[in-house]
Structure formats: C-alpha cells, structure tokens
C-alpha cells in the first residue's frame, strides 16, 4: 500500500503530490551524502536497514551509483530546521537548511513508508514512497515535552526510549523536572547528600523505588538527545517543591531542623528561606553544576506553587535566582508565577494555569519576554483521558485527543500573541506513573497533537485529517513496542 504524501504528523507546511511518480527502494538503492550530511545519512541508513534488509550503502557522492538514489544535501538559503523532500521515479532528494532540517526530512520520509519500516526484522514487502514534493518548516522554535522524573524516577534507558518516540514528531526540547518534594534526581558534587539521601530507596511517590542521574548519566542523556536534535532543559524547582533538598540539608530550612521525608502528593508546603545566605550558596552551586553539564541555552528554575513563601520573599528569591542563571550565561525558564518580578530579556515564562487570564504572563510578553504555552487543560499529559482512565489526575479536567488538538497557543491569553510565543510544551507529571509503559500510555496519542500545534501552520490543521493520520500511528507504535491509549476518537485499524 502506498501512503498519501500528506499523511504525516505534524502535517507539513506545503505538500505537492505527484501521483504519476513514486519511488521504490530495492536491494540496489544507495544513499549519497554530500559534505555535512554524513551523520544524518548514516542515521537514515540505520533506521531503514532492519525492516528492509537492504544494504543501503552510504557513499560520499551527490548521485551514487545504483538502481535509485537517495541524496542528502544542505541548502543554506533554508532556515536551519526547514527541509525539502522531493520524491520521483528515479530518486529521492532530502535538502535541509542545516542537519536539523535534514533530520526532519528523514522523519517525514520514515512516516511515508509502510508502517512495517518500524519493524526490527526484514519484511519482504514493497518499500514505496509516494511521489511529489514537501517543503516544510516549523511554526515555533520550541516544541517541547516535559517528564517529571522526581515523583517517579525514570532510568536513562527509559528517557532515551521516550526521546526516540518524541523525535519522530519533530519535538526538539525535553524538559526534565529533576527535583521536587519527594526526590532529588541529579547528582550535585558539591552537595552530595541531595542524591545520597533524597535519591535513595523509597523517595518516589508512595515510597516507590530509588533513582537519580549521575553526572555521566545526565551527560549521556544530553548527548543522546542532541543526536536527535533535542535540547535538554533541566529544571531545579525552587523556592517551593524543595522538601527533598531540606531533608538532605536541614540548613536550608528556617529553623535548621530537617523536615520529615514526604512521599505523598501534596504541593505548596516547602520553601527555601529567602533571607538565609546558605540558600544562595546552595542555589549557586546547584545551578553552576547543572549549567556545566548542559550545553543547551536554558536552565529552568521552577517557581511554581510557592504557597509556603511570602510574596515578598518570593520576589527576593526569584530575582536572585534569575541573576545566578543569567550570570552563568543561560536563559532562565520558569513557571509563570515567576513573572511576578521584572524579568531579564532572556527569560522565558511558561504558562500552565487553566484560567484564560494571567497578568504576569501578559506583562512579561508586553515587556518583550518570550512565553512557552503549557495550559494544563490542553497540554498536561497527566490528565486522565476519561473519567475511567486508570492513570492520571483530573484537577485540570479530562483531556481527550480532540481537546488536546483543538486550541491555538496564540489565542490562549489576551496580550500573548504569535510574536510573544517561543512555543508549546506538553508536561507529563508522574505522581501516578510508574513505568515507561505508563508514560507512553499518557503521551500517545496526545503528544502528537501538541507536536502538530507546535510545528504545523495553523491553517493546515484539521481534526478530521488529524485523527485519520493518527490512526496510522497505531501500527507503528505496536511494532516499536510503544504503549498507547486506544482513544475511541481515532479510527484505529483493527
Ligand atoms: C501542578 S503545574 C504542578 C505539579 C503537579 C501537577 C500535577 C505545576 C507547575 N505544578 O507540582 O505535579 O500540577 O498535574
């Protein structure tokens, strides 16, 4: 079966089918990598070999010898993430503005092949691409997902697996919520008890298992993500959500007494002390070490739900923390409560509330600041699909696929239009999630909806089209061993 040229998620900006032509891969197909495209060419060969069983040699030529050629090129007149995919009888040409664009051309090509391309063993079927041209580019620079590894820890391999599935939808940021009241999940050499105590056994919700990333683990995740054109955004949540840090270091409390360890799911009860020098020694050391390990431009400082901090202390603390981040040469990101203070120009405000109005975020946008849209009622992948969903929470309402798809980030907040938006992010809080399969079940099929909102031109989006394109993902997920929720809104094949 030959797919339709536009049967891709996120839907491409421009699709020009030419049904008179098509391209067949066969045992003689070769891949030509012009200078600068070798890495993506090797990646393309790697993902096509297992299911096709073809050699797919990569040669450093514009048009390799063979019964048909797949050529990779760079064209600096395109934006970095922009690409062109041209499919004719004689060959396929993938052109990217930079390697990121080429990588996205590969993701599109992969979805245009039969679903069996996701199999890990050879399938003797026809490997045919529909003819025509796609020219594609993202609407927003930041298309993100967030994983909460603090409430329940997820291993390096689990995060890598999540990254593999995210990258297929052209998601380019993974925000890791590394610390919270229950646990501390990143090694900090200068404050070793953070993980020695609060990364240990019983630090997950309801006393679930131990876990934290060593510096090497975290570096491995960053590199794996970079190979998929995904930037890791590390979050150290402050001044609230710090009980795990205070259990390890009682000097971070007002009275110097360690609080009891907490593995329940309450929020808003812990706070760093704005007036204590130890607080800032801690903040400076932690952010410096995390910055050292993070090549990406962002450091997320949390800032949410600080009900145990007075408004004045909150402002004092956030201002100091913002200065630490900018002093490290990074752009601070914070949940929108952070916009209670005057923000530095590089700061990014992440809107998460469900009400339509929020003065702080609009004020930040009016001052030229960038906004990341994560309204809980549309993007929180930990919300239940239906009242019957065994996993998830429902404080922001139920979230089915159509609701996750049917909104626009530029219309969500008065005063926060297209120009103010850095992009969208789909957070996944893990209070109720214990396994990678739980994560996948909540993310799929809703994450692709958020990915399409982040990438595709607004006028190209259409629910009827989307739910049919989503149906084609089911077989691919099964072949990859990815769990997903069989939403009744999607016409899954039997
Ligand atoms: C609110 S959204 C939180 C998290 C919870 C989440 C559960 C936000 C910035 N904070 O602490 O895990 O709700 O959905």
Image (cartoon, grey):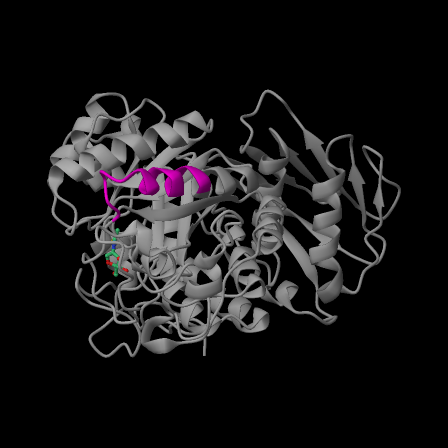
Image position of 27 (left or right of 340): right
Position of residue 102 in the picture relative to residue 340 (left or right): right
Can residue 355 be seen in the rendering of this structure?
yes
Quarter of the image where one finds residue 284: top left
Q: Is 275 one of the magenta-colored residues?
A: yes
Nearer to us in this view, 280 or 241: 280
Q: Magenta stretch: dominant SS?
A: helix
Is residue 465 something one can see in this rendering? no
Residue 172 placement (x, y as % from top left): 49, 43
Q: In the rendered view, tell whether residue 482 sits above or below residue 13.
A: below
The stretch in magenta equals 272-285
**Residue 200, percent across and down?**
46, 69
Q: Quadrant of residue 90?
A: top right
Q: Quadrant of the C terminus?
A: bottom left
Image coords of residue 51 (percent x, y): 71, 66
How far from the left and from the top, in percent, is residue 400? 26, 64
Residue drawn 49% across and 51% down? Answer: 169
Vertical placement of residue 212 versus 278, above or below:
below
**Ligand 1 - quadrant of the structure image:** bottom left
Is 215 left or right of 351, judged from the image as shown? right
Q: Residue at x 79, y 65 (%)?
A: 53
């Amino acid at each position: 079966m030959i797919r339709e040229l536009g049967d891709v998620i996120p839907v491409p900006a421009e699709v020009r089918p030419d049904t008179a032509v098509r391209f067949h891969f066969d045992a003689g197909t070769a891949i030509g990598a012009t200078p600068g495209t070798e890495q993506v060419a090797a990646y393309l060969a790697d993902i096509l070999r297992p299911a096709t069983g073809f050699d797919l040699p990569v040669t450093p030529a514009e048009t390799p010898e063979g019964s048909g050629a797949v050529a990779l090129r760079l064209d600096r007149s395109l934006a970095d993430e922009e690409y062109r995919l041209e499919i004719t009888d004689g060959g396929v040409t993938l052109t990217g503005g930079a390697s990121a664009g080429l990588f996205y051309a590969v993701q599109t090509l992969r979805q245009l092949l039969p679903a069996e391309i996701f199999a890990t063993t050879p399938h003797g079927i026809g490997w045919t691409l529909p003819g025509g041209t796609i020219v594609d580019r993202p609407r927003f620079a930041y298309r993100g997902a967030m994983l909460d590894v603090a409430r329940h820890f997820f291993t390096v391999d689990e995060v890598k697996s999540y990254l593999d599935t995210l990258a297929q939808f052209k998601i380019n940021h993974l925000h890791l919520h590394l610390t919270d009241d229950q646990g501390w999940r990143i090694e900090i050499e200068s404050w070793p008890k953070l993980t020695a105590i609060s990364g240990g056994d019983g630090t997950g919700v309801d006393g679930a298992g131990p876990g934290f990333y060593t510096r090497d683990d975290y570096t491995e995740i960053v590199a794996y993500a970079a190979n998929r054109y995904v930037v890791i955004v590390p979050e150290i949540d402050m001044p609230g959500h710090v009980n795990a840090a205070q259990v390890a270091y009682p000097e971070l409390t007002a009275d110097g007494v360690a609080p009891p360890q907490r593995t329940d799911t309450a929020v808003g009860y812990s706070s760093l002390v704005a007036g204590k020098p130890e607080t800032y020694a801690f903040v400076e050391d932690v952010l410096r070490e995390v910055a050292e390990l993070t090549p990406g431009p962002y450091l997320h400082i949390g800032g949410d739900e600080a009900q145990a901090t007075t408004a004045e202390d909150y402002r004092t603390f956030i201002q100091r923390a913002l200065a630490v981040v900018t002093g490290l040469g990074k752009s601070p990101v914070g949940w929108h409560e952070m916009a209670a203070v005057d923000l530095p120009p590089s700061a990014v405000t992440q809107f998460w509330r469900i009400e339509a109005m929020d003065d702080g975020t609009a004020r930040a946008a009016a001052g030229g600041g960038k906004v990341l849209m994560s309204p809980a009622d549309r993007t929180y992948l930990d919300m239940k699909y239906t009242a019957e969903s065994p996993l998830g929470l429902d404080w922001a309402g139920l979230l089915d696929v159509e609701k996750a798809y049917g909104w626009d980030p530029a219309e969500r907040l008065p005063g926060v239009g297209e120009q103010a938006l850095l992009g969208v992010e789909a957070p996944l809080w893990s209070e109720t999630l214990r396994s990678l399969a739980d994560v996948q079940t909540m993310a799929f099929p809703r994450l692709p909806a958020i990915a399409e909102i982040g990438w595709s031109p607004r006028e190209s989006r259409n629910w009827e089209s989307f739910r049919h394109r989503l149906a084609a993902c089911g077989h691919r997920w099964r072949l990859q061993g990815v769990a997903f929720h069989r939403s009744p809104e999607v016409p899954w094949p039997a």
